Image: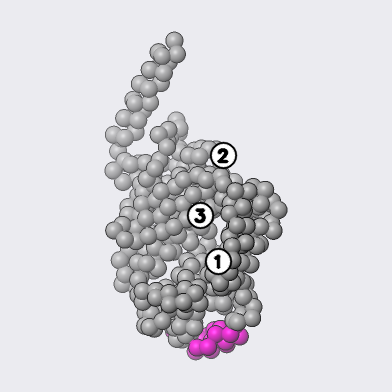
Amino acid sequence: MTTNRSLLLSILAAIFGTIFNTAPAQALDGQIAVLHNRRPVAVRVTLPEFVDNQLLSSPLVTMLNLPNDMVPDSTGCLCFDLNDDRFAFVHTFFHTHQIIASYNVFLVELGKPALNGVQFTLGKDDSMPTTGSASLRDVPRIGMTSPTPAVEVFTIAHEVAHLVDYRIGNRPTPTFVDLKSESEEAGVTEGTANILAALHLGMSGIPAFTADSLDSPQPNVDTFIRFPDLLITRRDVMQGMVDAPLFSIRYPTFINIIRDNLANPDLDLYLNEPDEYSSSAVINQPIWQAATQFGFATMKRLYLRTLANWHEDQVNYNTLAKQLVDEAKAISEDFSRILELQFRQRGLSL
């Protein structure tokens, strides 16, 4: 009886799979997560139209490693529970498509090729908070892992911003001549992804107290940094995670690795350099605060135009600040002067 039942289920799955795969492209609904009172809740949305009837594949992004049981319900909705791993793929597909579509408007304005065909691999890892990486070698790719199906949207936006930055691709190749230059060059890259994500989402960082962040301090663009005396080092960031009790309880293996790194004398020089995600707020806080006055789209356009017109030989906070100040004159001379003052108050020499 068990064999017959399994055979019947296999036949039904094949029939419904064939019906869906051969049906003409049509709008499907799906469930994604949005934050309510700092917690994710599921909402139903219309998904972008699929290309070639391939589930969760649009001209802009394709989710690669879909579960085998990713099948719409009787209403034509890819509606899954917040605790269902399939939820993560629908949620990530929708948000990634929307974010890329928004950036493509700016890329066209800059005369740059649109970002499309992103191949997105998503995995689950309960042992650590959400992580991601992005590359633009042969084709644009994003890989992410998340401990929960309600994947952190700020991290998604951060990785898409990396691809946008790579697509603009006007900065010199990093030299990494010493640890200081490595920290600052990485800070320009990661800080760029942070501020673009913040300006796109209208929030200054990963929301506090979500299931991913718990009580661990998170990089925030709206943080006062001043060189050389008021910095956040890599050691500070790691120690902050170790000292967060709820975070340590949830990710014990991850925390043990961090403890080992903190205790390793060979890493002292590296750990005592400014953290690229946090100390890049030396650039990002003035941009973020200006966005509340001039608008998020205006400041995103200013930042992207600065990347597109990059003309300095070096990549560091000073050269980035100088070019932002120059580009800001298109908004107004007064704003450019105010922005320059803000950067100088943070120890930058333009």
Mark nearest the camera among 2 and 1 is 1
Left or right, 47 with reference to 35: left
Task: State which tag comes first along the sequence, 3 or 2.
Answer: 2
**Placement of 124 over or under 209, stated as above or below:** above
Residue span colored magenta? 330-350
Pointer 2 residue: 83
* Magenta-colored segment: predominant secondary structure: helix
Residue drawn where x is 39% and y is 74% of the image: 174
Which mark is drawn over residue 131?
3
Q: Is residue 45 visible?
A: no
Q: Residue at x 62, y 53 (%)?
A: 255
- In the rendered image, which residue does mark 1 sit on? 266
- Disc sitting over residue 218 in the figure: none
Q: Nearer the viewer, mark 1 or mark 3?
A: 1
Secondary-structure class at tag 2: loop
Most extreme residue toward the front is: 265
Q: Is residue 40 magenta?
A: no
Which sits in the foreground, 99 or 130? 130
Where residue 152 sits: x, y (%)?
A: 54, 53
Residue 50 % position (x, y): 34, 45
The verdict on residue 336 being magenta is: yes
Q: Secondary structure at mark 3?
A: strand
- The part of the image, by quadrant, that contains residue 279 is bottom right
